[in-house]
Amino acid sequence: MFQVKTGQLVLQWRRRSFAAVAAGMVFIGLLSCAYAAPPKTKSDARLRVFLQKYLKRYPPVIDQGLRYSAASVSLDGGIKRQYLVYIASRWWCGSGGCAALLVEPYDSSFRVIERFTLARLPIRILPSKTHGWHDLTMPVAGGGIINGYTVLLKFNGREYPSNPSMAPKLPSSLSGTGTEVPLSEHGNLVY
């Protein structure tokens, strides 16, 4: 038996119950990744090389603090997976959010499906689809928006809306639904 003390609250677990809770959490974690999963090592290395080439074209200098977080997703329901990539640095973030990319494997590299501006986490994948691709949700705040809210991003047959602040507000009935894409603001260094 062990104890965790928090202020005046003392939590006690027996080893068996802790193992059951841990196993349950792992199972729930696996279920929540039905649509999103961390990228594999080989693909992640290719993605990093792609990002190094793609991202150095935009800022006037190579940003040594540039970080990215990527998750493999299946938005079109096919075998070929896409990657949602969250990009964070002083060059790629502002008061309204940071940048994000939706890319897919193409030949020996990747191609950009969408470049999101003003992206914020968490990004969620909804079970609903538009033109065969899953709908996404993303929070919108900052940049002059006083009360933040969440928007619904629908695929139009070619792309998602690149500026989330221009997308429609998520209906309250869908709030908190879907699968959260496992992205972080403190990802891996690009360079």
Image (spheres, rainbow, N blue to C red):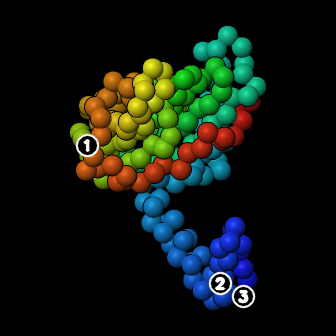
Q: Secondary structure at mark 2?
A: strand
Q: Along the horizontal axis of the image, is 52 left or right of 83?
A: right
Where residue 2 sits, quadrant-wise, is bottom right
Q: Amino acid at mark 2?
A: Trp
> Alpha-carbon distance for marks 1 and 2?
40 Å
Labelled disc at residue 48? none
Labelled pair 2, 3 in contact (Cβ < 8 Å): yes
Q: Are marks 1 and 2 in contact (CB under 8 Å)?
A: no
In percent of width and height, residue 98 lies at 55, 28
Q: Earlier in the sequence, mark 3 or mark 1?
A: 3
Measured as percent of width and height from the top left, residue 114 is found at 42, 29
User: What distance separates the C-alpha of mark 2 from that of mark 3?
Assistant: 6 Å
Tell me if I can see residue 79 in this picture: no
Label 3: how many Cα within 10 Å (few below 14, some 14–19, many 20+): few
Considering depth in this image, is 100 or 39 the residue closer to the camera? 100
Q: Which residue bears the numbered disc 2?
A: 13
Please tell me which residue lies in front, 190 or 41: 190
Q: Residue furthest front?
A: 8
Q: Decide: is 78 above or below 138.
A: below
Q: Quadrant of the N terminus?
A: bottom right
Q: Earlier in the sequence, mark 1 or mark 2?
A: 2
Looking at the image, which residue is at 45% across and 66% down?
31
Which residue in the protein does label 3 denote?
1
Write down the quadrant of residue 130 in the picture: top left
User: In the displayed structure, would residue 46 be above or below residue 165?
Assistant: below
| Depth order, front residue of 48/179 | 179
